[in-house]
Image (tube, rainbow, N blue to C red):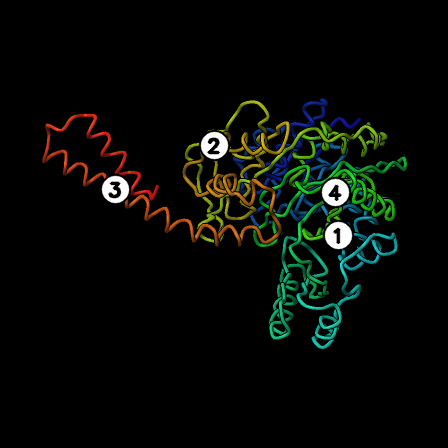
């Protein structure tokens, strides 16, 4: 086992990995930019090394600086977390050439699954269903138009490189294609340095369901069930749960088998996630992509399986076989995760950086907070504004929702706007509580909210009018009996609320 690991990341995921290292008595080294000098992950680490200015390109994306810090610290391995260099095959080779161990898949597997079109081809060859569309980059708008007509509208344009929703455009009709094609290519080029895009048939009422896979260097490949990740803003997840409200044991087995087939096809090693689109109409599912790293939403899988994915990553990277078999994996209860961001949900989830003046984190049974901040910390403008991965576990989905409601009511963050009010509202939303969710959930939630808020204001105004009227009546007739007054108030309120 390693004696010292460098974590090439920041924020809550760096803190999560540090905790795993502490449990198995491994020294944890972190790196930080000038903007993160006072961050929690720096305070928690056994050693911390400055790697440059706030700009990611000059710090967290600089493989040379990270490897230099690892060599100076005497670390034997590097854990990339997620984001930044976690899926950069060139960085993996740099790590290996320096004589260090990369805690993740080999660069060949990363390259094979890194391009969405090459990943589609591998899935097809492995016998895994994929959404109808192209397997090569579109050469022209004319080809895009011909393909769209062939597979049928609506279609989805997607950037071949990268992720996070960049370079994606939904096209409902031919008249929208030209503008969407140009916009997708432009955004792909600016985000990933590659303007290649391809087309997929848009699945009607799709759910985004992913399967956690794990592989070792001894030829063992298993899956750890699914996560429901359909609630997204700007194609990025904000609420995840395990298991999915719609998955039966039979569907889980089929999807799990397909995910393992993909992992085997590229000789995968470590933790990975195979993502699928699932039709809410007929439960048909299609391969979407593979993320060759740990996922943000890994806590819900850990809560329902009892398997520590980060500890297992470290063990596998050190050459150990998986500590469990497929038969050992059991889904126990239900878990829900809310990604708490410094964002304003009332302003299209735009970032809301600033200083956290007060922070109160809920506690109690079945509650887990993977945070990366503290009271007085500054949420930087330079990086992803995630504050915490906040998760709960219950014996079933109903209890998990009830527990999340209670815990969110206790969670307090003062000084910046956060997504907490959004989650509070979603936990009361009938579409969510009954499991009727898909990737268009947030747009539907906005529409329901726009209808409900004026009605609530009207009721609130009616209550105020009734209260004022009662106060005037009581002042005019002070001798009225208490019982009579109470009866009048009750009747007035009922009338005001339309009951």
Mark 4 falls on what kind of element? strand
Image check: 476 left or right of 308? Answer: left
Tell me where residue 257 appears, x and y as whole percent: 83, 43
Q: Which residue was labeled with disc 4?
A: 211
Marks 2/3: CA–CA distance: 30 Å
Sequence-first disc among 3 and 1: 1
Q: Nearer the viewer, mark 1 or mark 4?
A: 1
Tell me where residue 278 appears, x and y as whole percent: 71, 51
The quadrant where residue 21 appears: top right
Q: Which residue was labeled with disc 2?
A: 411
Frontmost residue, 402 versus 404: 402
Sequence-first disc among 2 and 3: 2
Marks 1/2: CA–CA distance: 38 Å
Query: Could you tell me which residue is drawn at 35 percent across and 41 percent down?
Result: 499
- Residue 464 is marked as 3
- Residue 284 is marked as 1
Marks 3/1: CA–CA distance: 52 Å
């Amino acid at each position: 086992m390693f004696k010292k690991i460098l974590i090439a990341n920041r924020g809550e995921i760096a803190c999560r990995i540090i905790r795993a290292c502490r449990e198995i008595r491994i020294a944890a080294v972190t790196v930080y930019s000038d903007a993160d000098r006072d961050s929690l992950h720096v305070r928690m680490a056994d050693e911390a090394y400055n790697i440059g200015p706030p700009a990611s390109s000059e710090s967290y994306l600089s493989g040379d600086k990270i490897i230099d810090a690892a060599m100076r610290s005497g670390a034997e391995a590097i854990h990339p977390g997620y984001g930044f260099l976690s899926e950069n095959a060139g960085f993996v080779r740099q790590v290996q050439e320096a004589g260090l161990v990369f805690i993740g898949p080999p660069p060949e597997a990363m390259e094979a699954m890194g391009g969405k079109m090459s990943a589609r081809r591998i899935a097809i060859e492995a016998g895994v269903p994929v959404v109808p569309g192209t397997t090569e980059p579109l050469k022209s708008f004319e080809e895009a138009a011909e393909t769209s007509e062939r597979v049928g509208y609506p279609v989805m344009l997607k950037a071949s490189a990268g992720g996070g929703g960049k370079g994606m455009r939904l096209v409902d009709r031919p008249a929208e294609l030209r503008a969407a094609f140009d916009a997708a290519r432009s955004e792909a080029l600016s985000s990933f340095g590659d303007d290649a895009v391809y087309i997929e048939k848009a699945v009607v009422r799709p759910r985004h369901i992913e399967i956690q896979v794990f592989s070792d260097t001894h030829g063992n490949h298993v899956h750890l069930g699914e996560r429901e990740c359909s609630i997204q803003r700007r194609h990025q997840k904000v609420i995840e749960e395990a298991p999915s409200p719609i998955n039966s044991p039979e569907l889980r087995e089929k999807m799990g088998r397909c995910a393992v087939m993909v992992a085997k096809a590229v000789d995968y090693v470590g933790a990975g996630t195979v993502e699928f689109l699932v039709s809410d109409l007929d439960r048909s599912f299609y391969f979407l992509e593979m993320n060759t790293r740990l996922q943000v939403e890994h806590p819900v899988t850990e809560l329902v399986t009892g398997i520590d994915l980060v500890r297992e990553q470290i063990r596998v990277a050190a050459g150990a076989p998986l500590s469990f078999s497929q038969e050992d994996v059991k889904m126990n209860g239900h878990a829900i995760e809310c990604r708490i961001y410094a964002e304003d949900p009332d302003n299209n989830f735009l970032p809301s950086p600033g200083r956290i003046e007060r922070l109160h984190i809920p506690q109690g049974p079945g509650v887990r907070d993977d945070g990366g901040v503290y009271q007085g910390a500054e949420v930087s403008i330079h990086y992803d504004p995630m504050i915490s991965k906040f998760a709960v576990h219950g014996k079933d989905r109903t209890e998990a929702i009830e527990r999340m409601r209670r815990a969110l009511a206790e969670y307090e963050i003062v000084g910046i706007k956060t997504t907490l009010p959004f989650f509070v509202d979603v936990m009361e939303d009938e579409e969510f509580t009954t499991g009727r969710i898909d990737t268009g959930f947030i747009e539907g939630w906005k529409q329901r909210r726009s209808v409900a808020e004026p009605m609530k204001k009207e009721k609130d105004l009616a209550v105020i009018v009734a209260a004022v009227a009662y106060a005037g009546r009581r002042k005019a007739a002070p001798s009225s009996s208490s019982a009579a007054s109470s009866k009048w108030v009750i009747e007035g309120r009922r009338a005001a609320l339309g009951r």
